[in-house]
Image (cartoon, helix red, strand yellow):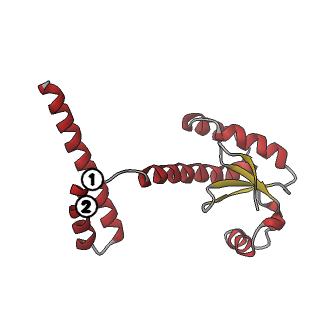
Amino acid sequence: MYKIIDEKLRLASCSISDLTMKQVHDFLSGWEDGTSIGTLTLFYDEEKNLVVLNQDNKSYEKILDMVRGYMKLNEEKRDEALRKVPESLKETFGVLNQSIEKMKYQEECRIINKQYVPSEYIGCMDFIRKKSNNEFWTNLNMFQYGRICGKREERARRKRGAKV
């Protein structure tokens, strides 16, 4: 459905006719009444973890060059560049910033899913999960428990190193 432009940047393109009816509905429901789907510049596909540009947009090539350059910048330089973006593109680059953040979160989740959890921690984690009936607090407590375990392991490692 999407044509990959840059795998490293997670950048793709598609035609308006490639969009599903659900995508079109979701975009239009968030816009002002009477706005045409043809004005779509870009969007983030969370399922595929891609920033997707509308290749039917009349300014596609110019936008592609700007997006490609912008995505290669570090956060500080992106903030500086965003101040220089023409007012007509502020919303587009706002969406792009949100996309970059979500892509970063996707990468963090990918890393987390590859982490080993020692069996000695599973009992306490299960206790935390069962004790809470609120997903937010469960997740926060799990995160805090992970930090505590990490600090304990780091202290133990330093202590072993000091005894040598």
Quadrant for residue 18, please give it: bottom right
Q: Are marks 1 and 2 in contact (CB under 8 Å)?
A: yes
Q: Which residue is located at x 22 percent, y 42 percent? A: 153
Left or right: 155, with 107 as reference point: left
- Farthest-out residue, top: 164
Q: Position of residue 19 (x, y in %)?
A: 77, 67
Q: Which residue is at 66% across, 48% downward?
A: 10
User: On the image, which quarter does residue 16 sit in?
Assistant: bottom right
- Secondary structure of the residue carrying tag 1 is loop
Question: As drawn, which residue projects farthest toward the left?
Answer: 163
Identify the residue under disc 2.
Answer: 122
Of residues 84 and 123, which is closer to you in this image? 123
Amino acid carrying label 1: it is Pro
Residue 5 locus on image (x, y percent): 75, 47
The amino acid at mark 2 is: Ile
CA gap, disc 1 and disc 2: 7 Å
Q: Quadrant of residue 73?
A: top right
Quadrant in which the C terminus is drawn: top left
Residue 39: where, in percent of width, then height?
A: 80, 61
Residue in the picture at 57% in, 35% down = 74
What residue is at 61 percent from the left and 38 percent from the top? 78
Q: Nearer the viewer, residue 153 or 35?
A: 153
Crowding at mark 2 (Cα within 10 Å: few <14, some 14-19, many 20+): few
State the quadrant of the N terminus.
bottom right
Label 1: few (<14), some or many (≥20) within 10 Å?
Answer: few
| Residue for badge 1 | 118
- Give the residue furthest to the right: 58
